[in-house]
Amino acid sequence: MNKFTVKIAGAMLLAGVLFAGPAWAQKKYDAGASDTEIKIGNVSPYTGWAKDYGAVGRAEAAYFRMVNERGGVNGRKINFVSEDLGAASGAEIAERSTELTRKLVERDGVLLMFSSFGTEGNLAARDYLNERKVPQLFVQSSSALFDDAGHFPWTMGLFATFRMEGVVYAKWILQSKPGAKIGVLYGDDDTGREYLAGIHEGLGDKAGGMIVKEVAYRDGDAAIEEHIAELKKSDADMFLNMSVGKFATAAIRAAFDADWHPLQFIPNASLSIAAFLDPAGLRAATGIICNARSKGWLRPGAENDPAVREFLAWMNKYNSDASLRDQNNLSGYERAQVLVEVLRKCGDDLTRANVIKQAASLDLELGMLRPGIRIKTSATDYQPISQLFLIKFDGNDWVSFGSVTGR
């Protein structure tokens, strides 16, 4: 079994106060917490078809390493125990994720699960973690299924949902290109169907007339080219390419090679230049629209922003082997920042009940989030980030356009 285990630390959100939590008269601990340590569990794909997303887990490990070097959280070091999802695909993801989650909880004794990968894997582990009252925080999936405090009070997502991405794209098309003929490529899974539902919701009663073709792909599909050929034959001039990861890379390349050049959209999960656009070819990716929540850091002058300078300094010192062109590093950095804030708020009450209580009472700004995007939760609202903005790839970097939108 591949295993990635690190005892690390991370740099702080609010310099000077992050590690100085309030004093409690009595210390309270559940499994995974002590006077010296907070043990965190995670499942990430460091090998296999989704290995590009392993950069998120490595970035989180690097951030915690910084935190630990600076004294930990309220004097406690973070022990980040991250297991490799490996080559699991399809139905295997659910089984493998559940197996590794059980190991982390029952054998390794983690206090909570954090930022585990994928919709299917997190859904598979959700019942188990909620039955055992183990926090399942900031899952690495933007499915709206993880904003369900009433039924699953121990599970929480982080970023704006897949459905919202679909809604925002569709509404932009309605406003800017009302005569568009839309072709949609989506995964034949929970994630893909949520993107599709958002597109239909955003188009409303115009969906039937504007969508000329919908094609679903499966994890095992070897020939995305055939799906692209179907979409091209439909005469669509708008391509909602809601494919994820390597499938997005393949679809971008296939459309370009087929000499089909509609205005193309991809989901946030596929925006990494290093992981997904470079392999497709930057010429093929030029003009694609996506969405983001965070500031850019590659364009000239970006370092004038203190938050960008802090991120780049962290990358240089703690995550120097990673590509600066890979957005997955910022995703891990932001996720780790939010978790450290939750743990700081817990003070000396490191019980699982208090962890979820603090996670459900956030009102927080992160330096790398675009102004207007804020992390807010409540006991009835488990969607920490619910805004985004549109970006377009200019052949070298993403350029933002339009205002922040969402709920």
Image (cartoon, rainbow, N blue to C red):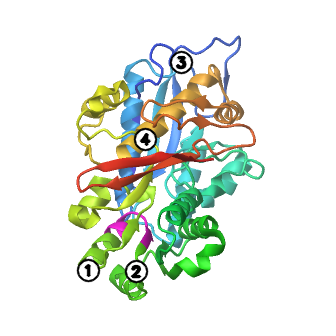
Q: Position of residue 211 (x, y in %)?
A: 53, 78
Q: Amino acid at mark 3?
A: Asn
- Mark sitting on residue 221: 2
Per the model, the C-alpha gap separating discs 1 and 3 is 57 Å
* Residue 322 vertical placement versus 77 (above, below): below
* Residue 315 vertical placement versus 197 (above, below): above
On the rendered structure, is 358 left or right of 302?
right
Q: Amino acid at mark 4?
A: Ser
Q: Secondary structure at mark 2?
A: loop
Q: Which one is in front in this view, the residue at disc 1 or the one at disc 4? A: 1
Decide: marks 3, 2 in contact (CB < 8 A)? Answer: no
Q: Amino acid at mark 1?
A: Asp
Q: Position of residue 350 (x, y in %)?
A: 64, 27
Q: Which one is in front in this view, the residue at disc 4 or the one at disc 3? A: 4
Return the disc, 1 or 2, that comes first in the chain's sequence. 2
Return the disc, 1 or 3, that comes first in the chain's sequence. 3
Per the model, the C-alpha gap separating discs 1 and 4 is 32 Å
Q: Secondary structure at mark 1?
A: loop
Label 1 Cα neighbours within 10 Å, binned few <14 / some 14-19 / many ≥20: few
Q: Which residues are magenta?
A: 239-249
* Residue 302 vertical placement versus 234 (above, below): above
Q: Closest to the observer: 171 or 154?
A: 171
Per the model, the C-alpha gap separating discs 4 and 2 is 32 Å
Decide: marks 4, 2 in contact (CB < 8 A)? Answer: no
Question: Mark 3 — residue?
Answer: 74
